[in-house]
Amino acid sequence: MSSKQPDAAATTLQCFWRRIVATRRVSNKRLWKWCIHKNATHIQCAWRSLMSRRALRLRRSERQAERDKRLLAYHDAKFQHLLNLIRWHGFMCDTAACVIQSWYRSFTSTESPRKKQSMLVASINLARKNRDVLKALEAKARLDMSEATDNNVRKALSFDMSRFDRM
């Protein structure tokens, strides 16, 4: 054995060992980068999930507030319509009572028949005029009610989601 053979063998072993160590280092660096990337992805995913849940909660609460507001407006309009109908019915009953009382007074009074007839005709004409006024008011109330309902439907169909796109 010459002196060059052990040196060559040592050089071969050193080269082999350095290749193994270099391969391991590269593999470890790749693994480390992959772990860092994976952990960063998990953190980003968790953060985005948190932000989207907050935005969703905010949208739901705003949508519920809008729904409550529309429902309140609907019930208010419905209540006003019912109130108008009750007033109209009461007014019609009052008018009918006035006509009946006038008719009764005309027959029980000691005035001339012509005056009795004119009183009766006047009370009937007053009742007709009041009925026409009340029918016009009722038609207006129904029109207002249908317009309010149409507006609520239009608002519900055109709900603006663009303000949530910025989040």
Image (tube, grey):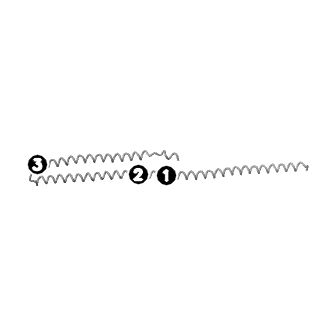
Say which mark, if any, is on residue 69.
2
Instruction: Describe the element under mark 1 as helix, strand or loop.
Output: helix
Q: What residue type is labelled 3?
A: Lys
Cβ–Cβ under 8 Å for marks 2 and 1: no
Q: In this view, does 51 lie to the left or right of 98?
A: right
Image location (x, y in percent) of residue 3: 90, 49
Kindly report which numbered mark, 3 or 2, lies closer to the viewer in this rendering. 3
The residue sitting at 63% across, 51% down in the picture is 40
Residue type at numbered disc 2: Lys
Element marked by disc 2: helix
Instruction: Give the CA separation, mark 1 to mark 3.
Output: 74 Å
Question: 147 above or below 104?
Answer: above
Q: Residue 58 carries which label?
A: 1
Q: Which of marks 2 and 1 is nearer the N terminus?
A: 1
Tell me: 24 left or right of 116: right
Q: Mark 3 points at which residue?
A: 115
Badge 3 density bin: few <14, some 14–19, many ≥20, Cα 10 Å: few
Q: Report the front residue among 114 and 52.
A: 114
Dot 1 surroundings within 10 Å: few (below 14), some, or many (20 or more)?
A: few
Specify whether 133 is left or right of 64. Answer: left
* Separation of marks 2 and 1 at Cα, in angstroms: 16 Å
